[in-house]
Every structure is written in structure tokens, then in C-alpha cells.
């Protein structure tokens, strides 16, 4: 009888200990997370997929209370910290995620599936202008798309912008190098248009919707290159052209998928 009582007490103690160690910090107020635009970087940037906020368990896994906790969890070997508030307010050394050129190898692909980015795209800093979209894709499960102008608030949170920029700052070898993205265009004049700009030079401009996905391709020179994929609202008075007919002029959205930067 004494042996049975001792065994029962031991089991009860073990079960109690197991139960009290399953609590997880849901991190509802945490701001530090892995950057979606820069390699091996933890940041407090507001630029991240909206789906990360939709599920409590996602926040518990993806967000952290401090930059050190983020780095220790995500990139324990090598980690860069980008504090967007420090760079915005004039503090820090100014080397934010939007001011760095990432050196690429001969082949670099981003299919926008999963959490890891294959190319250091800046979705908009400090305000997101592009976002991941898991409802439209050329391959896999996701692509990226511009956020409608009316949903992009500027830094003073009272006005809207008439452009949506997706920026890629990269440094490449002697080349020649090209970038190739699969594109789906659902915008049209007189409301909006889309173009790809390389180092301030417009390379590809589109003013009408195109049915189906197609390859968007351009080249670049050796060294540092700044590529901007821009959806821009036209300066035509919309009161003159009337309310937008989405079935004819499109939704004003552009999608990109399977972006490949390659050297030959």
C-alpha cells in the first residue's frame, strides 16, 4: 500500500510539472521580426505581410520583444539590426534596409513563397506600398502586388500618395546581368500606369492591361543598381473620365512572381 501511494504521488507531480511549462508568449505587442526585404536582418519595420497579424500563433512565432531575441532566434550566426525609428528620427548610422546595396551571385531567384526572401526587395519604407498576396500567383502559392493608393498613408497619416514603389538595390558583377519577373497587369490609363526604372531611367512602360502572365525583362550594368517597379496614378482629372469601370480598365493592380536576377 505504501508503494502504491508513493507511485501515485510521483505521477501526479510529473503531470503537474508538464502542464505548467506549456505557456507561450503570444507577443501581441512585439514589434521586432525578420525583415522581408534584407538578408539575415531583424527590424521593427511596419512592412510585413498583413497575414502575420491575423493569427495569434503566427505572431508568437514571427515576432520578438527585442532585437537581440529576434537575432538569437532567427539568425544566431550573423544578424543585422535595422531600427526604422532610429533612422527616421535622425539617429543611428543611416544604414537602414532602404539604403543598402546587396551583393548578388550569378543566379538569384525569389518566388515569394515561404518566409525567406531570395532577393532584397524593399516593399516600401517606412510605409508599405507593396505586399505579399497568397490569392494570386504564377507558380507556387504567392506573388507580390501593389497596395491600392487609397490604402497607402504617408508619414503624416493624413494624405495619400499617387505612386506605389517596389525597390531593389543590388550590386552585381561584370555581367551582363538581367532581371526577369513574371508580371500580371490589371491597370490602365486614364487611371494609372506601370513601369520599371533602372538607375532613374525608364526601361519598360505599360499603359494598358495585358491578359495573362508575361515575362518582364531588362538588363543592368555592373556595380550598384537601383531598380524601381512603380505603379503610378495618372494626372488625368478623374471627374472628367468618370467612375472606373473595373471590367474594362482593370483594378489598378500589378502582380509580380518568380523574379530572377542572373549573370552570364
Image (cartoon, rainbow, N blue to C red):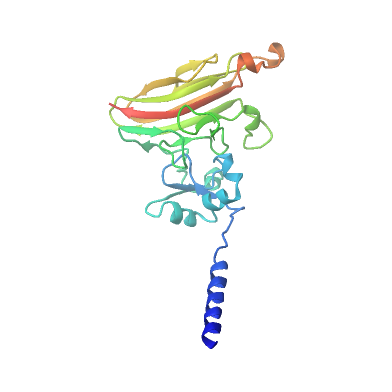
Left or right of 263 on screen, residue 231: right
Across and down, in percent, residue 169 comes to 42, 33
Q: Which one is in front, 195 or 110?
A: 110
The mark total stands at: 0
At a point 64% along the width and 18% down the height, the residue shown is 246
Across and down, in percent, residue 250 comes to 60, 18
| Residue 200 visible (yes or no) | no
Across and down, in percent, residue 71 comes to 45, 53
Left or right of 250 on screen, residue 92: left
Q: Does 258 sit above or below residue 233?
A: below
Q: Which one is in front, 32 or 174?
A: 32
In which quarter of the view is residue 147 placed? Answer: top right
Q: Residue furthest front?
A: 1
Position of the C terminus by quadrant: top left
Q: Which one is in front, 109 or 70?
A: 109
Position of the N terminus by quadrant: bottom right
Amino acid at each position: 500500500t505504501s508503494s502504491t501511494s508513493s507511485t501515485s504521488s510521483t505521477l501526479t507531480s510529473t503531470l503537474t510539472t508538464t502542464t505548467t511549462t506549456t505557456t507561450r508568449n503570444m507577443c501581441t505587442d512585439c514589434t521586432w521580426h525578420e525583415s522581408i526585404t534584407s538578408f539575415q536582418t531583424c527590424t521593427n519595420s511596419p512592412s510585413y505581410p498583413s497575414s502575420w497579424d491575423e493569427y495569434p500563433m503566427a505572431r508568437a512565432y514571427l515576432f520578438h520583444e527585442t532585437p537581440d531575441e529576434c537575432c538569437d532566434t532567427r539568425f544566431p550566426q550573423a544578424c543585422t539590426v535595422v531600427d526604422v525609428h532610429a533612422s527616421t528620427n535622425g539617429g543611428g548610422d543611416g544604414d537602414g534596409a532602404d539604403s543598402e546595396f546587396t551583393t548578388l551571385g550569378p543566379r538569384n531567384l525569389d518566388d515569394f513563397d515561404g518566409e525567406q526572401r531570395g532577393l532584397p526587395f524593399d516593399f516600401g519604407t517606412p510605409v508599405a506600398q507593396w505586399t505579399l498576396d497568397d490569392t494570386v500567383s504564377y507558380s507556387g502559392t504567392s506573388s507580390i502586388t501593389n497596395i491600392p493608393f487609397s490604402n497607402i498613408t504617408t508619414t503624416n497619416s493624413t494624405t495619400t500618395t499617387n505612386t506605389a514603389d517596389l525597390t531593389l538595390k543590388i550590386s552585381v558583377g561584370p555581367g551582363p546581368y538581367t532581371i526577369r519577373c513574371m508580371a500580371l497587369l490589371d491597370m490602365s490609363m486614364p487611371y494609372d500606369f506601370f513601369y520599371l526604372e533602372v538607375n532613374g531611367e525608364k526601361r519598360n512602360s505599360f499603359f494598358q492591361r495585358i491578359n495573362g502572365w508575361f515575362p518582364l525583362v531588362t538588363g543592368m550594368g555592373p556595380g550598384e543598381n537601383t531598380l524601381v517597379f512603380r505603379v503610378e496614378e495618372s494626372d488625368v482629372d478623374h471627374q472628367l473620365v468618370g467612375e472606373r469601370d473595373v471590367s474594362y480598365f482593370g483594378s489598378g493592380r500589378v502582380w509580380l512572381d518568380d523574379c530572377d536576377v542572373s549573370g552570364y
